[in-house]
């Protein structure tokens, strides 16, 4: 049986737990040094995943920006950029977004009812795979493993982070805590309500706590609850 990838959830959030505010512009929570750390983590991974909602809202390129890190990947016999992955149940994708036109290979996971819609929208911009009648994260991770992905970085949004944490599929969580307060109840949060493994008293193991300028990085091992 092919091993599933090591799953790393990565997010920057305010002290009160928000990923963004409700303004049209993206709220920059991290600082320059932390953005560089994220770039380093991206370079260490075989694939980077975001949800379709995050793609539509933020329109990211989702690249390894450092030329040195890209060159190192190539020297190691890897692709210059990690595989870029998105997930959509609705099939509502926009072929003009930056995600499709920068970097290397792209992969879309969807459900049976949306496969034809996604293929018609994207053409040859991405490989399209269905994981069944409903979104199945286990099948998705199995497919990534079959494609040689041993380390997967998940960069949101909150719904995807919540689903992976609730299903106990995240191996690491990287949280950059910014010294900001959003305070808007309809702004997106890192995690939503869910039936998390072990309940509210299960403590995750802390892997690292480090100050990066005015941001604090916390790394946890979610599967190592006690």
Image (cartoon, helix red, strand yellow):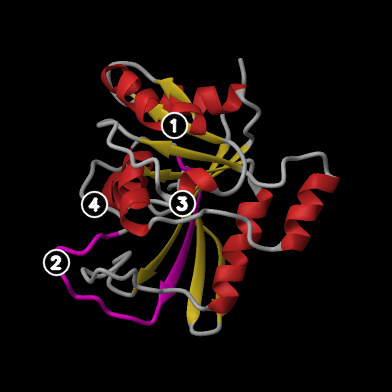
Label 1 vs 4, first from the N-terminus: 1
Element type where label 2 sits in the image: loop
Q: Which stretch did the figure color magenta?
A: 170-189
Q: Position of residue 45 (x, y in %)?
A: 63, 46
In the displayed structure, 77 sits above or below 55; it is: above
Element on which disc 1 rests: strand
Report, in whole angstroms, how far the alpha carbon at label 2 lies from the one at label 4. 12 Å
- In percent of width and height, residue 83 lies at 59, 39
Work out how far the residue at label 3 is from the one at label 2, CA to CA, in angstroms. 29 Å
Residue bearing the label numbered 4: 192
Q: In x, y percent, where is residue 158? A: 31, 52
* Cα distance in 3D space between marks 1 and 4: 24 Å
Identify the residue at the far left of this view.
185
> x and y percent of residue 206 in the render?
52, 60
Neighbour tally class for label 3: few under 14, some 14-19, many 20 plus, Cα within 10 Å: some
187, 66: nearer the viewer? 66
Say if the magenta span includes residue 177. Answer: yes
Res. 200 visible in picture = yes
Image height check: is 102 above or below 147? Answer: below
Verify CB contact (< 8 Å) between mark 4 and mark 3.
no
Q: Which circle, 3 or 2, is nearer the viewer?
A: 3
Q: Are marks 2 and 4 in contact (CB under 8 Å)?
A: no
Q: Which residue is mark 2?
A: 185
Horizontal side of 47 relative to 86 (left or right) equals right
Residue in the picture at 21% in, 64% down? 187
Q: CA distance from mark 3 to mark 1?
A: 15 Å
Give the CA distance from mark 4 to mark 3.
Answer: 28 Å
Residue at horizontal 34 percent and vertical 16 percent from the top: 132
């Amino acid at each position: 049986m092919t091993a599933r990838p090591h799953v790393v959830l990565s997010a920057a959030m305010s002290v009160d737990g928000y990923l963004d505010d409700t303004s049209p512009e993206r709220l920059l929570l991290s600082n320059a040094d932390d953005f560089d750390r994220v770039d380093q983590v991206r370079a260490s991974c075989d694939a980077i995943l975001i949800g379709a909602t995050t793609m539509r809202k933020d329109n990211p390129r989702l690249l390894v920006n450092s030329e040195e890190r890209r060159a190192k990947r190539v020297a190691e016999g890897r692709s210059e950029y990690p595989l870029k992955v998105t997930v959509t149940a609705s099939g509502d994708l926009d072929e003009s977004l930056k995600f499709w036109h920068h970097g290397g290979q792209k992969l879309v996971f969807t459900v049976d009812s949306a496969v034809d819609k996604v293929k018609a929208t994207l053409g040859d911009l991405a490989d399209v795979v269905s994981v069944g009648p409903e979104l199945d994260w286990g099948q998705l991770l199995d497919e990534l493993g079959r494609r040689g992905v041993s380390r997967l970085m998940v960069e949101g949004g909150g719904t995807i982070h919540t689903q992976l944490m609730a299903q106990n599929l995240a191996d690491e969580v990287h949280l950059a805590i910014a010294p900001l307060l959003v305070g808007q109840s309809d702004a997106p949060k890192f995690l939503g309500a869910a039936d998390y493994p072990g309940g509210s008293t299960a403590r995750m193991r802390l892997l690292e706590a480090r100050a990066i300028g005015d941001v604090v990085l916390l790394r946890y091992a979610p599967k190592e609850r006690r």
